[in-house]
Structure formats: C-alpha cells, structure tokens
Amino acid sequence: MKAVIIMGSTSDETHAKKITDNLDEYGISWEQHVASAHKQPLKVLEILETNKDDENIVYITIAGRSNALSGFVAANSTFPTLGCPPFSDKADMLINIHSTLQMPSDTPVLTVVDPGNCALAVKRIFGV
C-alpha cells in the first residue's frame, strides 16, 4: 500500500507536503517524484513502469495550468489517479481545476481540490 506522488515541478513541493503530512499521520507510505508530462514524459512512464506490478498503489498528481500529467498517468496506469492541482489564488485555482477536470475518455482522473481531502481519499481507497 503506497501513494505515489508525481509533481509537474519542484514548485509544487509545498502543496505536496500538505498531502504527505496527512499520509504520515494515517500511516500510509508514499514516494514523491518530479516529472512533467510535457517536458519529461519518458520519466513519467518510467515511474509508472517501476510500479506496475505492485498491488496497492494510488497515484496523486500535482500539476497546474495545462495539466497533462493527471491524464497521462491515468491513461498509462491501471491504478487510481487523484489529481490535486495547486493554486496560489482564486483565479489560479479556477484555471488549474478546469484543466484537471477536462480529461479525454478512458482517463479516469478523480479531482480533489483540498490536499487534506486528497490524503483522506487515499486512506479510504486503501481502507485504512
């Protein structure tokens, strides 16, 4: 049982910490990576390939603006993908949420705005 966090940029680390602090509290192991679907798609695929034979994985993707990361992970993995977009203000939030909600068919991304709720969703998915 592990949450795999993939961030599009190192600037997303503060947002990720809000999630990982809660995962720690719930006793859920996690690992964190920085890999942009736009700039480093092969690195994202390498992360997915490394975890493909595990049994209990939930991916958490943290990317804003043009969020290709969440859909890319969901389309190339059989594990649940929770998109938890970062935002600095209300306008930024609307852009990032909209980008995360608009996924093509066969790319099931569950969007969770609040980092605490994202960690809680992982807890519930794992039945902890």
Image (cartoon, rainbow, N blue to C red):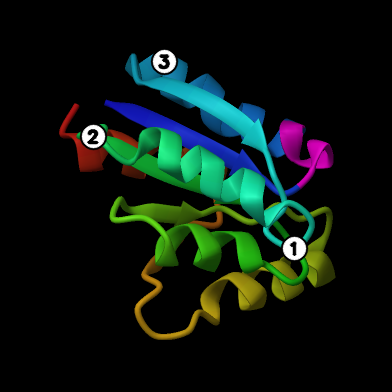
Helix, strand or loop at label 1? It is loop
Look at discs 2 and 1 and give the one toward the viewer. Answer: 1
Left or right: 122, with 19 as reference point:
left
Q: Label 3 is placed on what type of residue? A: Glu
Bounds of the magenta span? Answer: 9-13
Q: Residues within 10 Å of mark 2 (few under 14, many from 20)?
A: some
Q: Which mark is residue 38?
A: 1
Residue at image position (82%, 71%) is: 91
Q: Label 2 is placed on what type of residue? A: Asn
In the picture of the structure, the residue carrying the numbered disc 3 is 25
Look at discs 3 and 1 and give the one toward the viewer. Answer: 1
In the picture of the structure, the residue carrying the numbered disc 2 is 56
Quarter-of-image position of residue 21: top right
Q: Residues within 10 Å of mark 3 (few under 14, many from 20)?
A: few
Give the residue furthest to the left: 127
Residue 44: x and y, percent? 59, 48
